[in-house]
Image: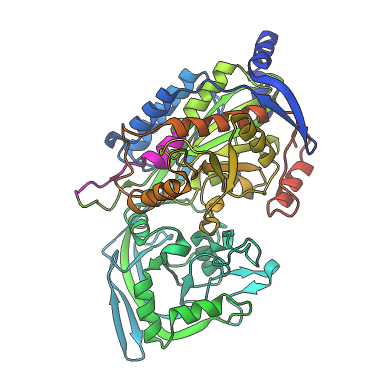
Amino acid sequence: MALRHSALFAVTAAALTLAGCQTMTDSQAVAGLDIPAAQPGQLSQSTMKDVTRTLSSDAFEGRMPGTPGEDKTIALMTERFKAAGLRPGNGDSWVQEVPLVEITGSDYAPLTISGKGTDLSFAFRKDWVGVTYREDAATAIADSELVFVGYGINAPERGWNDYAGVDVRGKTVVILVNDPDWQTSGLDGTFNGKAMTYYGRWTYKYEEAARQGAAGALIVHQTAPASYGWNVVESSWTGPQAYAQRGENAPPLTQMNGWVTEDAARKVLAAAGQDLDALTRAAQAKGFKAVPLGLTASTRFASTFRSITSHNIIGILPGYEAPDEYVMHTAHWDHLGRCTPAPDGDDICNGAVDNATGTAALVALAEAHAKAGPARRSLVFLAVTAEESGLLGAKYYAENPVFPLAQTVGGINMDAFQVAGPAKDVTVVGPGKSQLDLFLDAALKADGRVATPNPKPEAGYYYRSDHFAFAKEGVPMLYIDGGEDLIDGGTEAGAAVAADYTENRYHGPKDEFNEAWDWSGVMADLQLYYRIGRALSMSTSWPNWNEGDEFKAVRDRSCAGSTAGC
C-alpha cells in the first residue's frame, strides 16, 4: 500500500521548490530533532464558520453514525476535501468502512436491590442507566450478588489488584470512577497522582469487570472525579448505542454495564451497613480488599440491533520527497444524534463545539497546507467516526491502518475548539509524554504564546479522544486544547467559560452554533496546529515517546520491525 501511494503521488521538481520557498525558514536542532520553522498558514475563518454551521445544523440530526446525518457528513467532507486540493486517502476512495452494531435498549425495569430486610427501587434515567454490549434481545440480571470492588483496577505492574481474593463470577460489581489517587495535589503517585491514567476510565473498568467474569458492572457517578454531571451520563447512555462488531475471538462481556447516581449508591451502601466515604478512603489504599455487600441486584430490559457500516473519511496531500512518511491530523465527525430533550423540547444533540469545530479545522488546515504547496512528507486528514461511542473509528483505523503506523511520523488531534476569544496560553493535555512537545514549543514561540498544563489532569482527557487509539499502537500524538488565560478576563473568565460549557452544553441539545461566537481564539489555536503539522511534515526527524512513557515500548517494537519508517 505504501508503494502504491509513492507511485501515485509523485510531484514535479517545480512543485518541490515552490513548497520549500512557501513553508520554510531556517531549521533548528533541539534535543537532536530537526524542527523546521514554518511560515504562518493562510487559514480561512469563513471555512471554519461555514463547515461548523453546516455540520451542526438540525438537518444533520446530530451526526449519529448510521443515520442520514452520516451520509450528509460524508458528502460535505469529501466535497470540501476535494475542493481544498486533497486526494482520496484510501486508494480511489475518500472513506474507510468501519463495521459497527447499533444496540437500542427499551422497556427498562427499575433497578431493585434486595436483602437484609432491604427493598430499594431505582428508576431508569433518574437514578441509573445501563446498556448491554451483547446482542441479546432480552437482558435480565436476577438476584445478582453485589460486591464493592473499589476502583475496579487490576494493575500488576503497579502492585494493585482490587479483585484479589474475591470471586465475582456471575455477580454485579460496584465501582468508583477515576483512580485511587485522583485527589492528590501533585502528579506523583501509584496512578500518576492527580492525573488520571487509563485505569480511571469507564471503558477500562467495564473491560476488567468482564475479564473477572462479572454479570454486571455499575460505576458510581460523582461529578468531581468523573469531570461531568449526571446529565451527561443520562444523555450519553440512553438511546441507540454504537459498538464495534465482535469477532470470533473477542474478549468476554458482562451482561450489563451501567452507572448509578451518587445518591442511589449511598442508599444501597447504607442498606448494606456501609458508608460510601469510608469505603472510598479504604479503596484508595494499596491492599484494599473487595467488600461483599450482602445484597442482590435485579433488573431487565429489551434490546434491538442493527448492523451499521459507518465510515472514516480520509484525504491526503502527498509529500514531494518522502510520500511514504505520514503526518496525521485527526478529529471526530460524529456526535450523539437525538438525545434527552432540553426543557424546550429540543432533542437534537447538534455537537457544534464537540466536534463540528474540530472537523471544520481539518478542512481549514487542508486548505492552508494545499495553498502552501506539498510538504516533504505526506499530510493525512482523517475524520473518524464513533468517537462518542468509545473512540471506535480511531480504534478501527489504528488496528487496520490505511498508511502503515511505523511510517506514520506522529500527529495532532483536534476535539472541541474554545469559542471564547483569544487566550495568552494553550492547554497541553498530557504534557511531557513525547518529543512532539518540542514541536509545540517551537510553534508557541513563533506565535508569542505559552503552554499551560491541563488544569484538570484528574479528568483524564488524554484517554478520552481519538489520539489515544493511535497512542496505544505507539504513534506519538499531540493533543492541545484552548487556553484558559483569556486576554479579556484572564484565568477567571477562562475557567467560567469552561464550566459553563460543561454544565450547560456538553453532550446536550444546547451545544449549538452561535453566529455571535468570537472566532479569534479558534484561529490562533488553528495557527499552532498548522505550524506543528507543517514542521513535522518538513522535518527529517522521527519524534518518539519520552523515556518511561507507557507507549514508548510499543513504538520501539513497531520501529524495530520496519525498514521503511521510524
Which sits in the foreground, 544 or 204? 544
Q: Is residue 356 magenta?
A: yes
Which sits in the foreground, 124 or 221? 221
Relative to 277, residue 204 above or below? above
Relative to 19, residue 305 above or below? below
x 48%, y 26%: residue: 364
Q: Position of residue 115 (x, y in %)?
A: 36, 88
| Structure colour scheme | rainbow
x 69%, y 39%: residue: 438
Left or right, 56 with respect to 158, comes to left
Q: Position of residue 477 (x, y in %)?
A: 62, 42
> Exactly how many numbered labels are in the figure?
0
Q: Residue furthest top?
A: 14
x 61%, y 70%: residue: 154
* Res 141 visible: no
* Res 471 visible: yes
Quadrant of res 435: top right
Q: Is residue 50 magenta?
A: no
Which sits in the foreground, 269 or 40? 40
The quadrant of the image that shows the N terminus is top right
Q: Residue furthest front?
A: 489
Q: Position of residue 534 (x, y in %)?
A: 63, 27
Quadrant of res 293: bottom left
Q: Magenta region: which residues?
A: 344-359
Left or right, 512 with respect to 415, comes to left
Q: Position of residue 63 (x, y in %)?
A: 36, 40
The quadrant of the image that shows the C terminus is top right
Q: Residue furthest bottom?
A: 117
